[in-house]
Image (cartoon, rainbow, N blue to C red):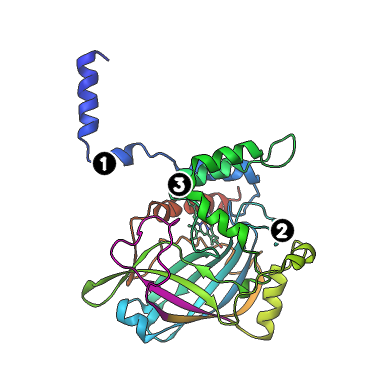
């Protein structure tokens, strides 16, 4: 290209509105991230590429009149909404030990009237460990086992931490909180900011969490040594066979200036909160062949009354889940 054509090309790229410039050349793609997960955790045919180890469950959700003041979602009609749930361990290792200091997940699919679906996929940490897909990609690559030791290379992990301060808050949270003794004894956080859409399209910025009615019960330091690798599934199946597990859905209302599009940043604790409903889980089953197994718990699947913000991580999740879903459905 001669000099005048080159400068013309530069000018026309610069003149593009930022949205087109981004769309033309995304920094990180979903197939790249899924490939990185496969590189670190291996390919487990027909399985999720992340949160691979998990347990199916079922129950219902009943919303409150207080929530209906802020959101017109059928979730908050006050009638029982059937729920399919999946509890999981973060990471693509189907044999991840249940004592691992990693995040636990709770994914919910609400079956609303007229075939509408609403989905949530939450973690048991109040914040996420990546403000952008690039941090997630770099973390996944830094966790790849070194063929010589079978463990991640400490130097690579150190370099990752130095380059990505946005990972720090979640890493510190995981290091300082023992994992739960049962999924039923863990709180789960929506983490992203969402919009509740009410009457006359009034928008309220919210963040939610699900808090177990029986209280949170982390493993003690002693129990961590003796609990073994596979107790979470049995604990949930056994406890729900005796009595349902219940969580209160608590919703915090944002104030101007609260972070909207950064899932690594918490909101001040004094934000006003209201109870938006109760989730009741009545049964649980191993995931193979059970109802939750084939579901793609894409958190961008939302029914009228709740909408996403521009959080780039929330938006990217939809693409990454689709790639993982496509692979596992086709038996890869
Ligand atoms: C860049 C950020 C993220 C990426 C690339 C990512 C990627 C993935 C992928 C590929 C899956 C497997 C999907 C499937 O095969 O169905 C998954 C599952 C999951 N993720 Fe994420 N994720 C991200 C952020 C998050 C965040 C912020 C949360 C919580 C707020 C979260 C919670 C979960 C949960 C709970 C599951 C399991 C869902 C199920 O049980 O099917 N993820 N993630």
Coordinates of residue 6 in the picture (x, y in percent)? 24, 19
Magenta span contains residue 274: yes
Q: Residues within 10 Å of mark 1 (few under 14, many from 20)?
A: few
Query: Residue farthest to the right?
Result: 226
> Is the residue marked 3 within 8 Å of ligand 1, measured from its CB?
yes
Mark 2 or mark 1, which has the lower sequence index? 1
Return the residue at label 1: 18
Q: Which mark is residue 133?
A: 3
149 relative position to 93: left or right:
right
Query: Circle 2 — which element?
Result: loop
Range shown magenta = 246-275
Coordinates of residue 78 in the picture (x, y in percent)? 40, 86
Return the residue at label 2: 97
Camera sees residue 240: yes
Q: Residue at x 64, y 46 (%)?
A: 41
Q: Residues within 10 Å of mark 2 (few under 14, many from 20)?
A: some
Mark 3 or mark 2, which has the lower sequence index? 2
Q: Nearer the viewer, residue 88 or 167?
A: 167
Camera sees residue 35: no
Mark 1 or mark 3, which has the lower sequence index? 1
Check contact, mark 3 vs mark 2: CB within 8 A.
no
Q: Residues within 10 Å of mark 3 (few under 14, many from 20)?
A: many
Coordinates of residue 239 in the picture (x, y in percent)? 68, 80
In the rendered image, which quarter is residue 257 located in? Answer: bottom left
């Amino acid at each position: 290209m001669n000099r005048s054509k080159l400068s013309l090309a530069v000018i026309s790229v610069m003149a593009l509105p930022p949205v087109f410039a981004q769309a033309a050349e995304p920094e990180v793609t979903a197939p790249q991230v899924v490939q990185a997960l496969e590189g670190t955790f291996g390919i487990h045919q027909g399985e999720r590429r992340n949160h691979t180890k998990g347990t199916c469950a079922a129950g219902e959700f009943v919303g409150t009149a207080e929530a209906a003041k802020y959101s017109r979602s059928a979730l908050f009609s006050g009638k029982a909404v059937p729920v399919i749930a999946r509890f999981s361990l973060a990471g693509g290792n189907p044999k991840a030990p249940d004592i691992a200091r990693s995040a636990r997940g709770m994914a919910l699919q609400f079956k609303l009237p007229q075939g509408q679906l609403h989905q949530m996929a939450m973690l048991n940490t109040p914040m996420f460990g990546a403000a952008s897909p690039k941090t997630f990609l770099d973390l996944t690559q830094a966790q790849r086992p070194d063929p010589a030791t079978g463990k991640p290379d400490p130097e690579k992990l150190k370099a990752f931490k130095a380059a990505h301060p946005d990972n720090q808050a979640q890493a510190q949270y995981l290091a300082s909180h023992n994992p739960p003794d049962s999924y039923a004894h863990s709180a789960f956080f929506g983490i992203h900011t969402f919009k509740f859409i009410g009457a006359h399209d009034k928008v309220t910025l919210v963040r939610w969490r699900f808090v177990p009615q029986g209280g949170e019960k982390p493993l003690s330091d002693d129990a961590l040594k003796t609990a073994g690798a596979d107790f979470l599934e049995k604990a949930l199946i056994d406890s729900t066979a005796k009595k349902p597990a219940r969580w209160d859905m608590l919703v915090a209302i944002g104030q101007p200036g609260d972070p909207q599009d950064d899932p690594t940043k918490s909101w001040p604790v004094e934000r006003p909160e209201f109870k938006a409903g109760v989730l009741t889980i009545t049964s649980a089953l191993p995931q193979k062949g059970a109802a939750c197994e084939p579901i793609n718990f894409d958190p961008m699947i939302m029914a009228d009354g709740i909408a996403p913000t521009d959080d780039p991580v929330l938006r990217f999740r939809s693409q990454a889940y689709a790639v993982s879903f496509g692979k596992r459905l086709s038996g890869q």
